[in-house]
Amino acid sequence: MKKQLLILFLFLGFINAQDVEEVVVTSSLTDQTQIDNPVHVVSKEDLANDASVSLGEALDNLLGVSNADFGSAIGQPIIRGMSGSRVKVLSNGMVVRDVSTLGPDHPNNIDLSNAEQVEVVRGPSSLLYSNGTIGGIINVVDNTIAKTDFTGTSGNFSHELQEANDGEVTTFNMQTNQSGLNISFGLSEAIFDSYEIPGGSIVHDDEHEDHEEEGHEEGDMTVLANSDYETSNARFGVSTTGDWGHVGFSLVSREGTNGIPYHGEGHGGHDEHGDEDGDEDHDEDHEDEGHDEHEGERIFADNTSDVFTLEGSYNLNGEIVKGIDFFMRSSDYSLTEQHAEEEHHDDEHHDEDEHDEDEHDEEGHEEGPTTFENEATEFGVVLDISNDNLNQKVAFNFAEEDMSIIGEEAFMNPVNSEEFTVGYYLNTKLGEFDVDFGVRLDDITRNGSVAEEHHDEDEGEEHEEEVELYDLNFSTQSYAVQFSQDWTDNLTVSVALSNVERAPGAQELFMNGPHLVTNRFEVGDVNLGTEVSSNVDFTMNYENDGAFASASFYANAVDNYIYLMDESEADHEDHEDEDHEEHHGDMIRANYLQQDAEFNGYELLVGRTITLPNGSLTVSLGQDSVIGKFNADSADESYVPRLTPKRTFIDVDYSSADYSAGISFKDVKPQYKTAMEESSTEGFMLVDMKVAKEFALSPDVGMTVSFFAKNLMDERARNHTSFVKNQVPLAGRNIGFKFNITF
């Protein structure tokens, strides 16, 4: 029997003094306008005046939110230790259906250059937005489809330069109202070369140090090869509004190319787990050739997407149904990974090896491209059935996805997924308590197959491929409730309980093949069951005369937690045979497993805003921590892989009418709480600075000029949450300049 607990709208009360104002949360189904729920809003101004970075990096300084990077182009957000499909990325309240969950080197299909704000919902209260969001959601909001009429014509033009990667970013956005039609248009282009890293940032396992030959001392590199990327985005939207509601459509197109700074190639020599696996034979195999084979090789990915959205609302003003919101979105996303070797090769080496395709396959060195595709269609309707006492809505949603992988790295057969949702949400006043409640029922079907090759002894070297089809259905129920009370004029307290269920993702069920970028042969399990998250959250928020503080504590027990686990050496030897070696090579075999886990953590913040004669000064100190363990009630407990280390933030910000400046310190502690076969990481401190000045060029035209410095002290840093933390360090000192003209 499935658990059915009351669930939360957990309130993560970490609020900066400048965030205590009323902010419209556009994606909230219950139309709450105050930040008295677990939503943190990153403003348009904060995004515009800072360096252009990936989605994960843009949110990495928020308490409870971290970044799983794969070079500067890739930044997948992690919320409270949860990642992958447990954290959904949305665009204007609808799930972004790309292929980011199929690989840590896949980017989120998001453009921040035109964002009005980014809404971050921590914890399972995010069930209001999408199914299975045990960790939370990231909702990027823009005004491409305007819900209220534009006034006149306005827009902005910006240009940005970054030093560490010779980066250049240009954006143009415009909105206008013509004959009652709201028209929104935007273009952006970003070009970044490979970024600089502090000397000695790249590390290898101890066993590999002996065979680092002269001329291949990767630890002394100052530029990370294949860490470049470029993107171009175009958007167009039209809408019309009135007392009756609004209706509009948008077209968004994106193209990009990003280098892949690490690719396993089946050799396994650069992976973080090399020494833990204890494979001495592997050491012998990973000689100089293992280091040098792909030197000078271009490894990159091209991605394209086209998204069409139709949405609207209609005010019925009926006795039962007050209004209706509707939307339809069709998206087509494609990402192709490939190699492009330099033209100059050693002729003798070329003649000797002949670069025979069969030899490449045997060595795991695969040159052909691999294309990841996702075609998706989603429909949704929300009925407003509010009355004088209850703000309440009923939602219906249907989504279909066709996901496929074609090419050399086709580690999963095509999968068709269908999702149907019915949800009910309310907000009301119950005595002295504000109550938020939500329940959703999701029916999810995944149709896929698994192909396995079996060695036929009677037929010699021939192999027989067996394909088994699966039609899997998951019915999930999720509930949430939150009680909030203003104890005093200055203190708010929230208590929340939750039960959220998540069906296994396509890759967790059907993956079965070599994933070169992680240097693993990844194997899914069609017998995986539904994850069930039971969460308790307690939050306090205080504000008085410029002083502010918040504390949030949570305990999240996840039954049947799904994770990717590397095989131990003993397990490897148990099933090692000729057939295994032929298909796995030197890659680490990793299996999707399921086990109960428990996540406990907190986010704390204290600070004060001081009024000065010509402005204000805000000083804040924050800290977050999360610990995730398997078998929490047993003696053989172990940690969940790639946990975010404890972090401490110190921020000092000054602002006036036309000037702002700030410096921030992020102290990341060492992470020794590791899973089996996982390496630890040392701590580091990053210092960032930012200065911005506003100028009035005319009564209707303004310009903001900003200077920023990332990693000012040029700290050597490796992100523990990254799959490739040892091979892909964070960028070194990056100084930049940006101007933004508004009209």
Image (spheres, rainbow, N blue to C red):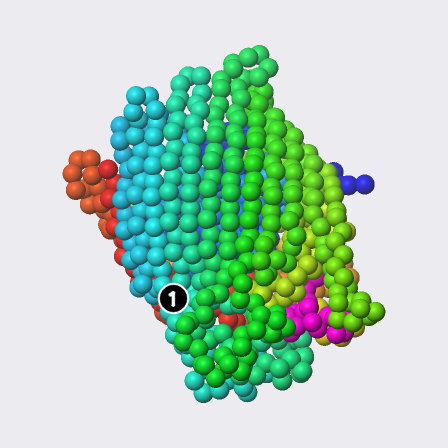
Q: Position of residue 607 (x, y in %)?
A: 42, 51
Q: Position of residue 525 (x, y in %)?
A: 73, 55
- Left or right of 37? Residue 704 is left
Q: Tag 1's secondary structure?
A: loop
Does residue 268 show up?
no
Pick whichever, 611 or 371, lies toward us: 371
- Residue 149 vs 217, above or below: the answer is above
Q: Is residue 682 magenta?
A: no
Pick whichever, 308 or 676, lies toward us: 308
The answer to which image quadrant residue 715 occupies is: bottom left
Residue drawn at x 63%, y 84% is: 284
Question: Label 1: how many residues lie within 10 Å, few (<14), some (14-19) or many (20+)?
Answer: many
Q: Position of residue 285 (x, y in %)?
A: 62, 82
The answer to which image quadrant residue 444 occupies is: top right
Q: Position of residue 179 (x, y in %)?
A: 30, 21
**Quarter of the image that includes the N terminus:** top right
Pick whichever, 184 or 336, lies toward us: 336
- Residue 345 vs 493, above or below: the answer is below
Q: Which residue is mark 1?
A: 195
Q: Residue furthest top?
A: 319
Amino acid type, residue under disc 1 in the picture: Tyr
